[in-house]
Amino acid sequence: MLLGKAAMLFWHAMTETDSGDRTFMEVALEEAREAARRGEVPVGAVIAIGNEIVARAGNRTIADCDPTAHAEMVALRQAAKKIGNFRLAGAALYVTIEPCAMCAGAMVHARVERLIYGADDPRGGAARSCFSILDHPQLNHRVGVVSGILAGEAAALLRDFFAMRR
Protein backbone atom coordinates (compact mmCIF):
# COMPACT_ATOMS: atom_id res chain seq x y z
CA MET A 1 0.00 0.00 0.00
CA LEU A 2 1.32 3.44 -0.89
CA LEU A 3 1.37 6.09 1.81
CA GLY A 4 0.79 9.76 1.18
CA LYS A 5 3.69 12.17 1.72
CA ALA A 6 2.32 13.39 5.09
CA ALA A 7 1.85 9.81 6.32
CA MET A 8 5.39 8.89 5.23
CA LEU A 9 6.84 11.90 7.04
CA PHE A 10 4.87 11.00 10.17
CA TRP A 11 6.03 7.37 9.99
CA HIS A 12 9.63 8.51 9.55
CA ALA A 13 9.33 10.71 12.62
CA MET A 14 7.93 7.76 14.56
CA THR A 15 10.73 5.38 13.63
CA GLU A 16 13.84 7.52 13.39
CA THR A 17 15.40 9.19 16.40
CA ASP A 18 17.85 12.02 16.47
CA SER A 19 21.20 11.31 18.11
CA GLY A 20 20.43 13.95 20.75
CA ASP A 21 17.07 12.44 21.78
CA ARG A 22 18.55 10.48 24.68
CA THR A 23 20.51 13.51 25.93
CA PHE A 24 17.47 15.79 25.88
CA MET A 25 15.34 13.10 27.54
CA GLU A 26 17.91 12.85 30.34
CA VAL A 27 17.39 16.58 30.97
CA ALA A 28 13.61 16.02 31.02
CA LEU A 29 14.16 13.25 33.60
CA GLU A 30 16.17 15.73 35.74
CA GLU A 31 13.18 18.09 35.60
CA ALA A 32 10.86 15.23 36.60
CA ARG A 33 13.06 14.36 39.60
CA GLU A 34 13.05 17.99 40.68
CA ALA A 35 9.25 18.10 40.38
CA ALA A 36 9.04 15.03 42.64
CA ARG A 37 11.27 16.74 45.23
CA ARG A 38 8.74 19.59 45.29
CA GLY A 39 5.88 17.11 45.79
CA GLU A 40 4.61 17.39 42.22
CA VAL A 41 3.86 14.42 39.98
CA PRO A 42 7.29 13.67 38.44
CA VAL A 43 6.92 14.72 34.82
CA GLY A 44 9.58 16.73 33.05
CA ALA A 45 9.72 18.40 29.65
CA VAL A 46 12.35 19.99 27.44
CA ILE A 47 11.90 21.95 24.22
CA ALA A 48 14.80 22.07 21.81
CA ILE A 49 15.16 23.90 18.54
CA GLY A 50 18.12 22.48 16.69
CA ASN A 51 20.61 21.46 19.35
CA GLU A 52 19.65 24.24 21.76
CA ILE A 53 17.36 23.85 24.76
CA VAL A 54 14.98 26.80 24.68
CA ALA A 55 12.82 25.69 27.64
CA ARG A 56 12.75 23.09 30.40
CA ALA A 57 10.20 22.50 33.12
CA GLY A 58 8.63 20.07 35.53
CA ASN A 59 5.04 19.82 36.63
CA ARG A 60 3.88 22.88 38.65
CA THR A 61 0.17 22.22 39.12
CA ILE A 62 0.35 22.20 42.92
CA ALA A 63 2.86 25.05 43.31
CA ASP A 64 0.98 27.30 40.88
CA CYS A 65 -2.54 26.15 41.88
CA ASP A 66 -3.04 25.72 38.15
CA PRO A 67 -4.48 22.58 36.55
CA THR A 68 -2.87 23.55 33.25
CA ALA A 69 0.67 23.79 34.67
CA HIS A 70 1.76 20.43 33.28
CA ALA A 71 5.46 20.25 32.44
CA GLU A 72 4.70 20.43 28.71
CA MET A 73 2.49 23.51 29.06
CA VAL A 74 5.01 25.34 31.23
CA ALA A 75 7.79 24.53 28.75
CA LEU A 76 5.65 25.61 25.76
CA ARG A 77 4.95 28.96 27.44
CA GLN A 78 8.65 29.47 28.27
CA ALA A 79 9.76 28.59 24.74
CA ALA A 80 7.21 30.89 23.09
CA LYS A 81 8.31 33.80 25.28
CA LYS A 82 11.99 33.09 24.68
CA ILE A 83 11.73 33.02 20.90
CA GLY A 84 9.04 35.71 20.75
CA ASN A 85 6.51 33.63 18.84
CA PHE A 86 3.74 31.24 19.84
CA ARG A 87 4.54 29.13 16.78
CA LEU A 88 7.46 26.89 17.64
CA ALA A 89 8.56 25.95 14.12
CA GLY A 90 11.21 23.26 14.11
CA ALA A 91 10.80 22.52 17.81
CA ALA A 92 11.09 19.12 19.42
CA LEU A 93 9.33 18.54 22.73
CA TYR A 94 10.77 15.86 25.02
CA VAL A 95 8.59 14.66 27.87
CA THR A 96 8.96 11.79 30.28
CA ILE A 97 5.42 10.44 29.82
CA GLU A 98 2.95 10.47 26.96
CA PRO A 99 1.12 13.82 26.96
CA CYS A 100 -2.53 14.25 27.87
CA ALA A 101 -5.14 15.69 25.49
CA MET A 102 -4.61 19.26 26.73
CA CYS A 103 -0.86 19.13 26.18
CA ALA A 104 -1.19 17.38 22.82
CA GLY A 105 -3.64 20.03 21.66
CA ALA A 106 -1.26 22.78 22.71
CA MET A 107 1.53 21.12 20.72
CA VAL A 108 -0.64 21.13 17.61
CA HIS A 109 -1.50 24.82 18.11
CA ALA A 110 2.18 25.67 18.68
CA ARG A 111 3.16 23.75 15.52
CA VAL A 112 5.70 21.60 17.38
CA GLU A 113 7.51 19.45 14.81
CA ARG A 114 8.33 16.39 16.93
CA LEU A 115 7.24 14.86 20.22
CA ILE A 116 9.66 12.48 21.88
CA TYR A 117 8.38 10.82 25.03
CA GLY A 118 9.42 8.13 27.45
CA ALA A 119 6.63 6.01 28.93
CA ASP A 120 3.18 5.39 27.51
CA ASP A 121 0.21 6.58 29.57
CA PRO A 122 -2.53 3.96 29.18
CA ARG A 123 -4.96 6.02 31.29
CA GLY A 124 -4.78 9.32 29.48
CA GLY A 125 -2.12 9.41 26.77
CA ALA A 126 -3.15 11.43 23.75
CA ALA A 127 -0.39 10.51 21.31
CA ARG A 128 -1.46 6.89 20.88
CA SER A 129 -2.53 5.09 24.08
CA CYS A 130 -6.03 6.54 24.56
CA PHE A 131 -6.26 9.13 21.80
CA SER A 132 -4.34 9.99 18.63
CA ILE A 133 -4.57 13.76 18.63
CA LEU A 134 -1.16 14.48 17.13
CA ASP A 135 -1.91 12.80 13.81
CA HIS A 136 -5.67 13.33 13.63
CA PRO A 137 -6.63 13.82 9.97
CA GLN A 138 -9.02 16.70 10.67
CA LEU A 139 -6.39 18.90 12.31
CA ASN A 140 -4.29 21.32 10.29
CA HIS A 141 -0.93 20.24 11.77
CA ARG A 142 0.65 16.88 12.50
CA VAL A 143 3.32 16.26 15.10
CA GLY A 144 5.80 13.45 14.48
CA VAL A 145 6.05 11.07 17.44
CA VAL A 146 8.87 8.97 18.85
CA SER A 147 8.12 6.95 21.97
CA GLY A 148 10.01 4.74 24.39
CA ILE A 149 13.12 6.88 24.91
CA LEU A 150 14.31 6.04 28.47
CA ALA A 151 10.82 4.69 29.12
CA GLY A 152 11.92 2.44 31.98
CA GLU A 153 13.40 5.34 33.95
CA ALA A 154 10.37 7.53 33.33
CA ALA A 155 7.93 4.81 34.38
CA ALA A 156 9.98 4.01 37.49
CA LEU A 157 9.89 7.66 38.61
CA LEU A 158 6.10 7.69 38.45
CA ARG A 159 5.69 4.24 39.99
CA ASP A 160 8.01 5.06 42.91
CA PHE A 161 6.38 8.45 43.48
CA PHE A 162 2.87 7.01 43.75
CA ALA A 163 4.05 4.02 45.81
CA MET A 164 5.45 6.41 48.44
CA ARG A 165 2.13 8.27 48.60
CA ARG A 166 0.04 5.14 49.29
Image: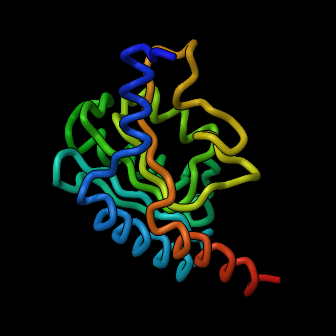
Q: Quadrant where the C terminus lies? A: bottom right
Of 154 and 17, the residue lying toward us: 17
Of 47 and 144, the residue lying toward us: 144
Q: How is the image coloured?
A: rainbow
The percent position of residue 71, horizontal first and vertical second, equals 49, 56
- Extreme residue in the bottom direction: 164
Residue positioned 28% across, 67% down in the render: 23
Indicate left or right for 151 with 75 as reference.
Answer: right
- Extreme residue in the front direction: 1
Indicate left or right for 54 with 96 as reference.
Answer: left
The percent position of residue 57, horizontal first and vertical second, equals 40, 61
Residue positioned 61% across, 71% down in the render: 155
The percent position of residue 70, horizontal first and vertical second, equals 55, 53
- Extreme residue in the left direction: 51
Q: Is residue 10 above or below residue 52?
A: above
Indicate left or right for 3 with 50 as reference.
Answer: right
Numbered disc total = 0
The percent position of residue 162, horizontal first and vertical second, equals 73, 77
Q: Is residue 4 above or below residue 30?
A: above
Q: Is residue 166 above or below residue 54?
A: below
Of 26 and 152, the residue lying toward us: 152
Residue positioned 42% across, 13% down in the render: 4
Residue positioned 20% across, 39% down in the render: 83
Indicate left or right for 55 with 146 as reference.
Answer: left
